[in-house]
Amino acid sequence: MNEIECASENLRAGGVVAFPTETVYGLGADARNEDAVRRVFAIKGRPTNHPLIVHLAGISQAGEWAAEITETAHLLMQRFWPGPLTLVLPARIDVPRAVTGGQDSVALRAPDHPVALALLRAFGGGLAAPSANRFGAVSPTEARHVRAALGDSVDQVLDGGPCSYGLESTIVSLLDGCPQILRPGALPLAALRDALGEDGIELPDQIARAPRVPGALAAHYAPATPLEVHSIETLATRAEVLLAQGLRVAVLRRNRDLRGTPTLPLLPQFLLPAEPEAYARGLYARLHELDHLAFDRLLVEATPIDEAWWAVNDRLARAFRGSCPDGGPRGRN
Ligand code: TXA
Ligand code: MG
């Protein structure tokens, strides 16, 4: 039996299998098996009212989960599946409410990764899969991140190499009226506008108005190393303050020419590419790597306030918020 067949057998027996997607690694279980789905929540330590995405092999399976597939839903599936777009649709009554967190809607997506698609085809049904990290931690973009976080609690980890996007899918709700973005992600806003027209897609209020205010975001997560986001102008001053407190500080910044900006104190600097897609691809892996180095604080250079950076800015803001729950920086404990 090859690895995919073995994983598919595991899933049929109610097991939990981590698998690669083009965005991040997922923690999959048979979406029709409530016990298996409950195990996913338990392994992640995730509250059971947080709904999971059902992963499908393709459009032809969507009708098994969604009560209605509107013309817009069909258009988006045709255009972007398989790919990093999750659609929230009214759920059929036979969709286990363990998957939807008790809601009457269901989130669906067809991942664009050869291993995920082979697994979904071999298994034949839908796989409920959140990102394969513990609740509140950074999503995994490599199989070793999954093993390090979840270890033996999962039945199998399929290794498909590093994820090509490195950031979670874009989530669009088609529940009422105009399609609405619930989570910016790997599929750029420009692609959705291109498919639906300039006014065909609605942005969440708080993001449309203030892309960076961490407090405005409901959910957040944090790397083990508390992280702060600062403009390159204020970063040097902040670093001096933290260094004076005796903290071990590292800087994560974009790989670009810093001439004309304040000189940073002598401290370890880590780089990510200057372009948004490449930055997104490397961000989580960098955060995982930096956690191993156990700095007291990571100072991240703020990325541009620009639509192309929306998803990255959203994740950085959530991580900042997760690191400083009271609005102010805190220590490791
Ligand atoms: O790229 C991704 O989307 C990855 C890979 C593994 O596919 N998955 C992922 O899953 O990020 P997770 O569980 O970490 O995030 C799923 C998001 C949650 O924010 C959840 O609230 C939202 O999807 N969601 C799921 N079902 C929903 C629903 N019925 N209504 C609104 N939001 C929903
Ligand atoms: Mg997640």
Image (cartoon, helix red, strand yellow):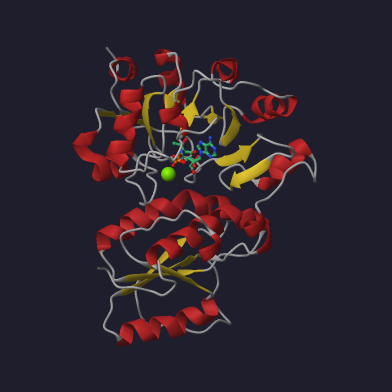
Residue shown at 44%/23% (left/top)? 96
Image quarter (top left, top right, bottom left or bottom right) of the C terminus: bottom left
Q: Nearer the viewer, residue 242 or 273?
A: 242
Quadrant location of the N terminus in the rendered image? top left
Splitting the image into four quadrants, where does ligand 2 fall?
A: top left
**Closer to the camera, 131 or 255?**
131
Image x and y of residue 114, in percent: 46, 25
Q: Position of residue 131 (x, y in %)?
A: 40, 40
Residue 158 seen in the figure:
no
Q: Residue at x 27, y 69 (%)?
A: 332
Q: Quadrant of residue 309?
A: bottom right
Classify residue 43 by image quadrant.
top left
Between 274 and 14, the one lying in front of the other is: 14
* Numbered marks: total: 0
Residue in the image at 34% along x and 71% along y: 297
Left or right, 12 with respect to 151, comes to right
**What x and y, as percent, mark residue 296?**
29, 71
Instruction: Report if residue 238 is visible in the image.
Output: yes
In the image, residue 244 sits, relative to residue 145, either above or below, namely: below
User: 260 and 325: which one is in front?
Assistant: 325
Q: Is residue 101 above or below residue 6?
A: below
The residue shown at (40%, 55%) is: 221
In the image, taking residue 84 as reference, residue 26 lies left or right, namely left
Q: x%, y% of residue 35?
A: 31, 24
Q: 214 above or below 99?
A: below
